[in-house]
Image: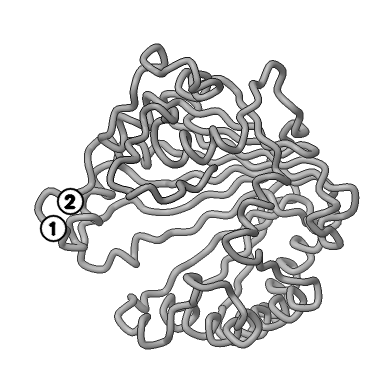
Amino acid sequence: MEQLSAGRKLDQAFEEVGKKKTLSFEVDLDADVASLKALDAASDPEPGEEIPDEVAELLSGAKITVTVQSKKPLEKSGEKDLVGTAMKVSTSDGDLVEYRVIGDYTYIRADMDALGKTTGSPLPDADDLPPEAGAMKDVLQGKWVKFNTKEMDRAGAEDGPASSLDSKTQKKLVNALRKVVAREVEFKTTGGGDGTEHVTATAPFRTLITELLGEIRPVVKDLPPGMELPTAKDLKDAPNAKVTADFTLKNGELAQVDIDLAKLAENAKVKNLGLTLRMREGTLPSAPAGATTLDLNDLMNGFLGGPVLSDAEIDTSGLNGEDVPQG
């Protein structure tokens, strides 16, 4: 009876989330630098490929904040119903990357100095870029830039059709997941003060993931190339330790989720490894003022593909007079 009661309480909490038109939450990686380095060492990296201290420090303090706003309740919303989306990745030293999708535009800014130090690939100084770099200077200076989302989608469609799950497929997916959860996950509930309850969900990791993927595979069999799901054979060496998620409910609504992943480290000397998700009020996504427009050529040639080059800087010798495709 407790199993049904605890599982049903959790179901109802997620149903309440689906009724909202605005959802805000933050995700923290609950891990210290020593645990991350121990986990990396246990994976037997090649010499020189060990996780850098800077990356371990960044990850240990990383926090992701997400807000989604829709015209309809989220459970009934499609992509066309979204009014705004915002995501921010922060560290103990400040915001690292932030983007917002509002109307026809995507807005983005990043601490490029911090990203360069973390990746070990320092970026050029904005003052060193040629005048034709345009808004790329703003990118390097960490200012807001924007680009037309539909133009980017059209450019992506030239490389192949976009694949998304229709509402019918999504419902099949949810039903498949619920079947596996009901079969493999053990629920328990404990009371608390001030309307607070805890529902814990425990399941063996490899068994749960293998069965989830087995149910999902027929539903999403038409994934685009390069997005194939791992097979049961691929997962045979995954740890099968039991993982527990602790859901905090406040007056029946989901308030926080804590997942302890330390047992998955198996033989690594990991003391602290987990994820925490907190529901927040958040602020509604809005278009930042003063964002510079980054055109598609700037984005593809500079931000994604390297420094912007003028025609005079492109060496066309050796092409035997063949026509050079124009961007």
Task: Describe the element under mark 2 as helix, strand or loop.
Answer: loop
User: Which image quarter holds the C terminus?
Assistant: top right
Q: Is residue 282 shown above or below 233? A: above
* Residue wearing tag 2: 49
Q: Is residue 82 left or right of residue 214?
A: right
Q: Residue at x 77, y 40 (%)?
A: 84
Q: Amino acid at mark 2?
A: Glu
Q: Amino acid at mark 1?
A: Glu
The location of residue 9, given as percent across then percent down, is: 74, 67
- Tell whether label 2 touches label 1 (CB within 8 Å): yes
* Residue wearing tag 1: 46
Q: Is residue 219 left or right of residue 35?
A: right
Q: In the image shown, does 185 or 284 lie closer to the viewer?
A: 284
Q: Residues within 10 Å of mark 1 (few under 14, many from 20)?
A: few
Q: Is residue 121 shown above or below 34? A: above
Q: Is residue 327 shown above or below 97? A: below
The location of residue 107, given as percent across then percent down, is: 65, 32
Q: In the image shown, does 55 or 109 lie closer to the viewer?
A: 109
Q: Residue at x 56, y 79 (%)?
A: 185
